[in-house]
Image (cartoon, helix red, strand yellow):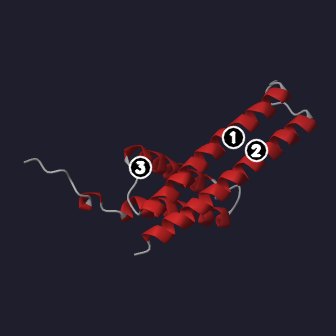
């Protein structure tokens, strides 16, 4: 079956997306700082730093999920409980962002987000957890 290749493609896409999110937030922080923009009286430098920190945290989360999918592809096993929770959270984020981005960004962004959602969900459901060997008690 195509479990391993899907996990690898999902890992690569999430890692590229993580880099893109970090670069986008870095650029937005520079724009806010150079334009001295303010939102409701907030300090522009604080907004710049917040954009950079938010981008780093979200990019790190996406990179962690990408590494987790790469480990799934390497081991050809389902992720553990914490890994499943991280990937489910990442899938939910992509679903919500996909639904949100239809209006402001357009349908191609929606299609991309749903493709990434599928690449995250398929490794979660493709591995049968019941097929794992269970310890027997004698």
Label 2 to label 3: alpha-carbon separation: 27 Å
Provide the secondary structure element on which disc 3 rests. Answer: helix
Residue in the image at 53% along x and 65% along y = 8
* Image coordinates for residue 10, horizontal then vertical, percent: 55, 62
Contact (CB < 8 A) between labels 1 and 2? yes
Residue 25: numbered disc: 2
- Pick out the residue farthest to the bottom: 1
- In the rendered view, would you say 50 is above or below 128? above
Residue in the image at 37% along x and 45% along y = 81
First reached walking from the N terminus: tag 1 or tag 2: 2
Residue in the image at 70% along x and 42% along y = 55
Can residue 114 be seen in the rendering of this structure?
A: no
Q: Residues within 10 Å of mark 2 (few under 14, many from 20)?
A: many
Q: How many labels does the image show?
A: 3
Foreground tag (2 vs 3)? 3
Q: Mark 3 points at which residue?
A: 84
* Image coordinates for residue 77, horizontal then vertical, percent: 38, 60
First reached walking from the N terminus: tag 1 or tag 3: 1
Provide the secondary structure element on which disc 2 rests. Answer: helix
Label 1 to label 2: alpha-carbon separation: 8 Å
Can residue 60 be seen in the rendering of this structure?
A: yes
- In the rendered view, would you say 53 is above or below 112? above
Q: With 6 as the anchor, is 29 left or right in this view?
A: right
Contact (CB < 8 A) between labels 2 and 3? no
Label 1 to label 3: alpha-carbon separation: 22 Å
First reached walking from the N terminus: tag 2 or tag 3: 2
């Amino acid at each position: 079956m195509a479990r391993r290749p899907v996990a690898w493609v999902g890992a690569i896409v999430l890692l590229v997306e993580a880099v893109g999110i970090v670069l986008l937030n870095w650029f937005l922080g520079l724009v806010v700082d150079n334009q001295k923009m303010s939102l409701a009286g907030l300090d522009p430098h604080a907004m710049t730093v917040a954009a950079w920190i938010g981008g780093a945290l979200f990019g790190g989360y996406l990179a962690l999920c990408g590494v987790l999918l790469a480990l799934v592809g390497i081991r050809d096993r389902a992720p553990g409980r914490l890994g499943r929770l991280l990937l489910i959270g990442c899938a939910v984020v992509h679903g919500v962002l996909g639904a949100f981005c239809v209006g402001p960004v357009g349908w191609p962004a929606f299609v991309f987000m749903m493709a990434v959602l599928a690449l995250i969900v398929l490794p979660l459901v493709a591995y049968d957890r019941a097929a794992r060997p269970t310890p027997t008690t004698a």
